[in-house]
Image (tube, grey):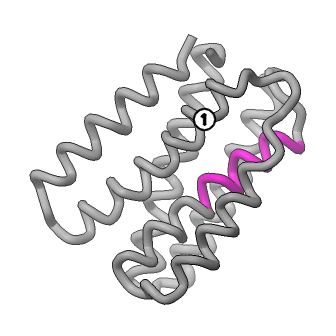
C-alpha cells in the first residue's frame, strides 16, 4: 500500500481528473487547462512526498488523464475508444519497480472507476454514480496504508 498522505494526494489528483473531464464535456477550455495545471501541481506534491520518483508521479497523472479520456469516449466519441484504450495502456506501463504489481493494478482500477464516476455524474444517473462512488472510495481505501 501507499503511505496515507501519498494515497490522499492520489485521490485529490483523481478529483481533479473528474473536474478536467467535466470541463472537457462542457467544452470549457479554460477550466480544462486550469485542471491540467492543478494536476501538475499534484504531481509535485506526490514527488515531494518521496514515495515514488518524479517520473512515476507524472505517470500516475498520465494514467488519471488517460482513464478520464477513455471514460469520455463512452459519452461523446465511442469510435475513439480503441485509441483511448491504447493510450491508457501506454500510460500504465511499465509498472514501477518499487510498486507491487497488485498495488499498481489497484491504482489503474482506481482511475478507471474515477472515470466511470465522472460519466455517471455527467449523465445524472444517481444510482450509477452511487455505485461508482462506492467502488472508487473502496479502491481508494485499498491503496492507502
Q: Is residue 60 magenta?
A: yes
List x then y, in percent, for residue 19.
45, 62
Quarter of the image holding residue 98?
top right
Q: Magenta region: which residues?
A: 55-65
| Above or below for 67 versus 93 | below
Q: Is residue 111 magenta?
A: no
Q: Residue furthest top?
A: 145
List x then y, in percent, for residue 44.
79, 41
Residue at coordinates 26% horizontally, 35% vertically from top-left? 134
Say few, some or many: other residues with alpha carbon within 10 Å of mark 1 (under 14 / 14 to 19 / 20 or more): some
Would residue 100 appear left or right of 141 to someone viewing this image?
Answer: right
Would residue 97 appear left or right of 85 to someone viewing this image?
Answer: right
List x then y, in percent, for residue 8.
54, 27
Quarter of the image holding residue 130?
top left
| Above or below for 74 versus 111 | below
Q: Residue furthest front?
A: 82
Q: Which residue is mark 1?
A: 105
Q: Main secondary structure of the magenta part?
A: helix
List x then y, in percent, for residue 30.
56, 80
Quarter of the image holding residue 137?
top left
Work out which quarter of the rendered image holds the N terminus and state it: top right
Residue at coordinates 28% horizontally, 46% vertically from top-left? 132
Amino acid at each position: 500500500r501507499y503511505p496515507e498522505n501519498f494515497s490522499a494526494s492520489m485521490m485529490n489528483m483523481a478529483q481533479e481528473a473528474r473536474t478536467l473531464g467535466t470541463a472537457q464535456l462542457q467544452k470549457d477550455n479554460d477550466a480544462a487547462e486550469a485542471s491540467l495545471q492543478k494536476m501538475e501541481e499534484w504531481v509535485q506534491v506526490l514527488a515531494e512526498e518521496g514515495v515514488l520518483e518524479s517520473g512515476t508521479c507524472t505517470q500516475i497523472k498520465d494514467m488519471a488523464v488517460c482513464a478520464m479520456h477513455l471514460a469520455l469516449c463512452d459519452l461523446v466519441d465511442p469510435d475513439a475508444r480503441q485509441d483511448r484504450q491504447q493510450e491508457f495502456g501506454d500510460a500504465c506501463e511499465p509498472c514501477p519497480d518499487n510498486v507491487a504489481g497488485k498495488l499498481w493494478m489497484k491504482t489503474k482500477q482506481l482511475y478507471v472507476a474515477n472515470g466511470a464516476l465522472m460519466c455517471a455524474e455527467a449523465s445524472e444517473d444517481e444510482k450509477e454514480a452511487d455505485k461508482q462512488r462506492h467502488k472508487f472510495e473502496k479502491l481508494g481505501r485499498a491503496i492507502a496504508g
